[in-house]
Image (cartoon, grey):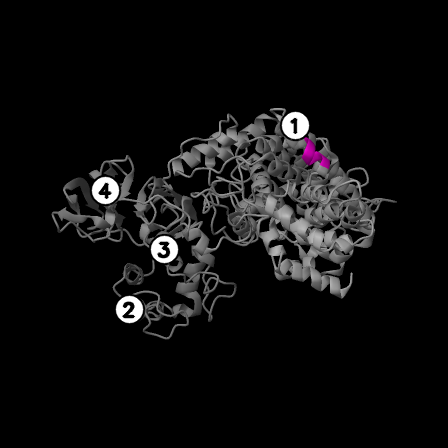
Amino acid sequence: MSRTQMIWRNLILASCGLLLFSSVMPVSQSVQAETTSPATEAATTEPESKPVPVTAIRIEAATPEKIAISGKDSRQQVLVTGDQTDGRLRDLTRETEYKIQPAEVATIDADGLITPLSEGTAKLTATSGEFQSEFPLEISGIDNPLPINFKNQIAPIFTKLSCNGGGCHGKSGGQNGFSLSLLGFYPDDDYEFLVKENRGRRIFPPAPAESLLLTKATGQSPHGGGKRMEEDSYEYRMLFSWIEQGMPFGTDNDPVITGIECFPKSRVMSHNSEQQITVLATFSDGSTKDVTRMALFEPNDTEMADVSKTGLVSTLDLSGEVAIMARYLSQVSTFRATVPLGAEIKELPESDNLIDLAVFGKLKLLGIPPSDLCDDNTFIRRVSIDIAGRLPTEDEVRAFVADETPNKRALWIDQLLESPEYADYFAKKWNMILRNKPNAATDAAGTYGFYQWIWNSMYENKPYDKFVSEIITAAGDPTRNPAVIWYRSVNENNEQVEDTAQLFLGVRIQCARCHHHPFEKWSQNDYYSLSAFFSRIGYKEMDDVRYAHGSEKILVHTEGTAQANNPRDGQKLAPAGLGSEPFTIANDRDPRVYLAEWMSNPENPFFAKSVVNRYWKHFFSRGVVEPEDDMRETNPPTNPELLDNLSQHFVDNQFDLKDLVRTICNSKTYQLSAFPNEYNLKDKQNFSRYYPKRLTAEVLYDAFHQVTDTTQAYAGLPQGSRAVELRNPDSGPYFLKVFGQPQGDTACECERSQDANLAQSLHLLNSTEVQNKVSNDTGRAANLAKAEDSTSEEKIRELYRWMYAREPNPDELSVALAHIEKNKENSRTAYEDIVWALINTKEFLFNH
């Protein structure tokens, strides 16, 4: 390719090509294919929200009989709810006037926070406009207060004030000589640090106000963390009282927290509206306590809602569902806000598919009309890429569009699922997240063997529970049992635990290795109980057998007691699944077999949902839970009914992966157009349209060779192999690296980058590789130019079917023909220009 030709092609793109390429994909779809701009979002039509009249109000509390507050240090957040004429509920907590009679029992501020003053009963009256509500109030524990409990009342203060965060005293080694346990998960240690370390210099019982703990936090003494509280604050008074009482820690008989719950649990809200939530803690003695003002809050989608330190949720402009995480001590809970768009939905596609029932039911609740169904051209390209990792051929496109069989889409899905290309594509997916790559040149045989085992499992449709079980329990010689190669990359106990949890349970448990998980209920005991399943793995010397590590060993089960030690307290833990009771396992039994049986149990709350969510993201570009392998209570699904029903369907069908793919792709939800309507452009979590996604590196590279009618040789693979068949990512060309090919270093699919960058654009526009293959003497452009049995129009139509699986529209056809006519003396260059130009469009680079 000459420099003159390269310059000429750039000029084409800048001039007459603009019409050609802008018409390839409409602006709305082109924008959403990358990043939706604020200007575009602002242009989206939304129904105007008007105030809805209220018919009554009521005071709400977690206990319906009365508000009971025990102890002078307790507080209670009140909720006032209005019943609207449209059947919805509106939070009026901050729009209400309050009165407590008699006033000497308690006081209440404008935000609805009750503070006790003396023992007794009283009546709380809330007035909003013409409406009024009353509620009984009972105060106790004032005259004979219990000593302050350090674990339950003092440790949470350091978390609320961010003192024990990872960037302050909670980091490893502490800050400026003072350490706290991360997020207060080990209050016993915190007590030692505060009261006994450095001879107790931080605490001064004779004059609590002079304690460094208080003077630093209030800014009276120099403090690197700055001022953290006021002298008249609740936190200050609690710390002062605790020091004044002699810094009590508490006794072994004191109640411990067993859980927290948000109230209300969920609510349908309007755009730019507010909802106060309360957090109620339950303790081992059955008592409850309002901990709203000491809990930490965080939304799972900051574009949908904000939440204040006091638990006031404020929705923003987007419609959908947002979860607010509340955390107190080691417990977590969530509040869910559903924010409808409120548009009228006149009709929905008819379907009895369980996916459509859940998705369209949610869209109807939200008032978000879905896009229309996509046409046949779009469908065959979309589903061929998503199932087989390839573009449909030109012949397949023509035949499919012309076919009038009513169920032709279902038949095409079945045909793809039975093809070797399906196994190629999904074997590539699992090969990467199972980290199958050689550690040395001598490991290549093991890598290829494990890949072929994965490929066979996909092609033969091995039940998923069996597939996972054979990996988890693998042992012996890798030449006879290739699945044992998995233990080559995950050869450390912590890797085995963390990859198992993330890959097969959808749980990122890494944090619990060193401390209690900050956003989940998993503790170090949970982590090491799971670790105990892998505690009896050993390696045995064998003659003439080279194990995957490169040593003369094979993986075996060694007899003995299966257990793991919690390094923090030395506790010996028996094997236990997450949230399950410990197993009693005989010394001669492999504990991994029990793990596999626990995981594949139909009642397991993680196993089926994890793979269903992983496959859902493969087809829809985002999971029902996002990220797809971070499934926890504080990161709930956007459509619980969808995830529950599809997971149950997967279990009922004996963990059939092909059936799972078939069910997804036959749904009307999957077959919706990527074109947004006037209401759903902002929707990015409810699947009201197909979300365009860039072709993965391997699929794009294969598509590039398919449309240019060229090939690429790969070391160790036969001629004609595709990039999706690569066993070892290290053997791929630079093209794959620049377009985000994962290297199989982790179990996270996030290792595959789908982000666009300048290097990608420059590579497609100007790289020698692209230019040489576009202008290849036996390539598509050259063959089109010299074909004499077709007209220029027929050739352009054929090219568009290869590129986009559709016919060119009149403007596109006109521009292309004009360019050919302009360069009729050198038609090959004209066709090369057009091929090169079409490859650089979003419509080619994205699956839509």
Disc 1, SS: loop
Q: Tag 1: Cα neighbours inside 10 Å, few (<14), some, or many (≥20)?
A: few
54 left or right, relative to 790: left
Q: Nearer the viewer, residue 747 or 131?
A: 131
Which mark lies nearer to you, 3 or 1?
A: 1
| Residue 110, position as x, y percentages in the image | 21, 53
Residue 82 placement: quadrant: top left
Q: Earlier in the sequence, mark 3 or mark 2?
A: 3
Under mark 1, the amino acid is Asp
Disc 3 and disc 1 in contact, CB within 8 angstroms: no
Q: Is residue 263 visible?
A: yes
Give the residues in magenta.
395-399
Disc 4, SS: strand
Q: Earlier in the sequence, mark 1 or mark 4?
A: 4
Under mark 2, the amino acid is Ala
Name the residue beneath numbered marker 3: 150
